[in-house]
Amino acid sequence: MTVRIGLSGWQYDSWRGDFYPEGLAKRRWLEHVGERFPAVEVNGSFYSLQRPSRYRAWRAAVPEGFRFALKGGRYLTHMLRLRNVDTALANFFASGPLELGPALGPVLWQLPEQVVPTPEVLDAFLAALPRSHGDAATLATGHDAKVAEPATTTEHARLRIDHALEVRSPDAVTPEHLAVLRRHRVALVDSHAGDFPRFVHDTDAPLAYLRLHGAPHTYHDGYAPEALADWASTVRRHDEAGRDVWVFFDNDAERHAPWDALGLARLVGRPQTRSDSPGASGTTSPAGSTT
């Protein structure tokens, strides 16, 4: 099994002069991330359909073995609320994710607090999700005119696609909802923050997906050494249980995310890079961080 500890997003101007060296061009920030982490969570795919050329550029910027977890489009989760999603799903996968090839990691579907699908709606949505690159390419042929440059390659048809669901309401974590997740082997995200609840349930998925937003001040607070040690124990338990483990730090507002991610990786015993100490790149960690 694999353990990948990375960042939720990478285009944060406030990180310049801290995680990113002052003189490093913004177009090279992803390359910098790829030298220090094995994975990143893509936020742009959540807000709008991307272009195949952008996915190809992302893939070219990182080393072999790097993985991109994609956030599924909010149009499906926040507007359609998981209903009547066939064309929207086709558009999402036609917009370029398959251009990542083997670098494509799991897809995260994030529900807002006010969206609580019935178990029946959730079941239909999860049943529609493609489970391989070949399935996704077939699904993508149903795109509409919103995708001007469709990408439906089947070069890596047999590669698996895993999915994870993040919810914010206890009403979306009933025994009936969990039974649906288990039937489809979709992971329930273990999401930690200061202003929404944490749900920890085994759904028989082949992966564990952790998102660490910081607490008590969501997005702003870093994790103390003791807290990181607790998360390291959680990661080890998932790894020992035979799950692929994906951990993404989203406490980006005060620049804690990269340093916390590197700190957790050291505790887990999975060095992230050839040179992951702050001094190695000429940068320093922010006050209060764990490095």
Image (cartoon, rainbow, N blue to C red):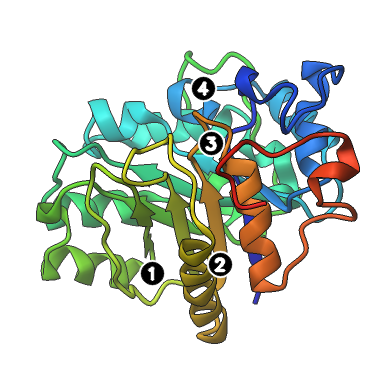
Q: Could you tell me residue 102's position as x and y percent?
A: 74, 53
Q: Name which of mark 4 and mark 1 comes first in the sequence.
A: 4
Which numbered tag is attached to residue 185? 1
Counting labels gives: 4
Dot 1: element: loop
How far apart marks 3 and 1 lie (CA) works out to: 20 Å
Residue located at (49% from left, 40% from top): 250
Q: Which mark is residue 245?
A: 2
The image shows residue 231 at horizontal and vertical percentages of 48, 67
* Nearer-the-camera pick, 110 or 118: 110
Answer yes or no: do the residues labelled 4 and 2 have beta carbons within 8 Å? no
Q: Which residue is mark 4?
A: 49
Furthest residue in direction bottom, as rendered: 240
Residue 212 located left or right of residue 260: left
Q: Earlier in the sequence, mark 3 or mark 4?
A: 4
Quadrant of the image for the N terminus? Answer: bottom right
Q: Find the residue positioned furthest to the front.
A: 287
What SS does tag 4 mark? loop
Real-space Cα separation, disc 4 to disc 1, in angstroms: 26 Å
Q: In front: mark 2 or mark 3?
A: 2
Q: Name above or below for residue 95 compared with residue 100.
A: above
Give the side of residue 112 with respect to residue 75, left or right. Answer: left
The answer to whether one can see residue 4 in this image is: no
Query: Which mark, by number, is residue 93?
Result: 3
Q: Nearer the viewer, mark 1 or mark 2?
A: 2
- Of the two numbered discs 4 and 2 in the rendering, the one whose residue sits closer to the viewer: 2
Q: CA distance from mark 2 to mark 3?
A: 24 Å
